[in-house]
Image (cartoon, rainbow, N blue to C red):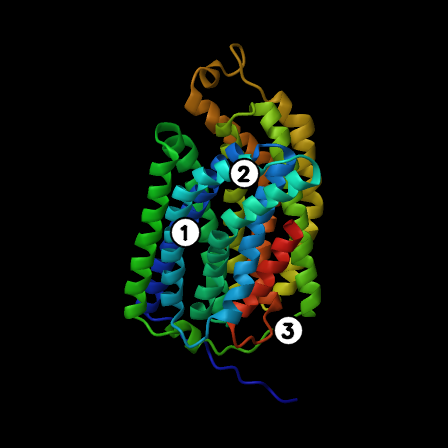
Amino acid sequence: MSATLVAPAMEPSRDSRARSGALLFLFLGSGCAALIYELVWFHVLQLVIGSSSISIAALLVSFMGGMGLGSVALPRLVPRSWHPLRVYAGLELSIGVVGLILLVALPRVQTVYLAAVGYGLGGVLLRAVVCIACLLPPTMLMGATLPAVARWTGATRTGVAQTGRLYAANTIGAVAGVLTASFYLLRLHDTVVTTLVAVGLNVAVALAALWLAARSGPRPDAAAADVSEPEPVAARPVILGAIALSGVASLGAEVVWTRQLSLLFGATVYNFSLILAVFLAGIGAGSLGGAWLAKRTGRADLALAWCQLALLAALPYGAYMIGYQIPFWQVGEHVLPWVYASRPLLFVYDIARCAVSMGPATLCWGASFPLALAAANTGESDAGRLVARVSVVNTLGAL
């Protein structure tokens, strides 16, 4: 019986770890800016096309569809010879420019829309055209950021785990963006100031990415050093099908649970933002765990399967808690009066109720993405294509 010698994976240098850590902070800022934009654009476009279920669906499909298209387009349009961090910087600067353009253009869209709006199918199609025209360019740029940087982290086990951590950082940044925009920027300022804050974040992230690019090669040291033996994986179509179905379940549950919890907490923009922030925080925390596991396990496909099996218990649990338990966890003058009398404490209490009900499922969904990246990786030469493939099927499932 012959033995296979596996070269030990070298530890990344201190400089490489520092650059990878800095990149996590950049993706944190990128995610924060993206959710600030999303809230501003949804707020303004709802004033233009209305807030009916059809209008909301058009907004969501345009936003998420643009993200998926951007992830697929980047590996096909951007040569691999370009430095990934410079590409990322260009994308962030472009998002800021488009954000400024939309700041000026969106008020004028309302004039055109009101002049042409009609009823029936024509009105629905016009709403879709307005959403696509306004949201597709910036969301495609946003969707391209993770595949772009994945080319720098690489398609090794270490690189895929780092990509999973970047996804987690981006999601946690989105939590900060939701809370900052909802509870401070849009409450005390207007959409102009809020947009300028997001543009400032884009510019800061782009400049920092250029600074990192000037001090690093097109690939980090860790990616070149990781020469561990390829792990066995399940058939790629099975992995992609699993992550697509995970997208179906996650967005479906988010819509239902958000509607139910809004009825319990009150249908205000602040409560909606709290629910969304808790959902995203669970996704982000789960992604960190999934990235950690993807680096250490030799069977990411089995770990992904266990996550999906855990959802078979987490989904009924969440439905049971929201339907039969959370409604009775009320506060008032005679039940936890010190919480009832304080608005900040009441928000914290609502966050706890959301976390208890949605936490298990969101952790599983978050862990599924980096595990799917690792499981679908069969020695890709272009990590950007790997990330694009997993991202787009997950997005299509959500749509």
Q: Is residue 55 left or right of residue 108?
A: right
Vertical relation: 187 (above or below) 278:
above
Q: Amino acid at mark 2?
A: Tyr
Vertical relation: 70 (above or below) 39:
below
Q: Nearer the viewer, mark 2 or mark 3?
A: 2
Q: How many marks?
A: 3
Q: Residue at x 61, y 66 (%)?
A: 375
Q: Residue at x 31, y 47 (%)?
A: 200
**Residue that numbered label 1 is attached to:** 98
Callout 2 environment at 10 Å: few (<14), some (14 to 19), or many (20+)?
some
Q: Earlier in the sequence, mark 2 or mark 1?
A: 1
Q: Position of residue 52 (x, y in %)?
A: 62, 32
State whether residue 285 appears in this view.
no
Q: Position of residue 35 (x, y in %)?
A: 46, 44
Q: Earlier in the sequence, mark 2 or mark 3?
A: 2
Camera-side residue: 120 or 26?
Answer: 120
Q: Position of residue 233 (x, y in %)?
A: 65, 70
Vertical relation: 361 (above or below) 375:
above
Q: Which mark is residue 232?
A: 3
Q: CA distance from mark 1 to mark 3?
A: 43 Å
Mark 3, secondary structure of its residue? loop
Q: Residue at x 42, y 77 (%)?
A: 81
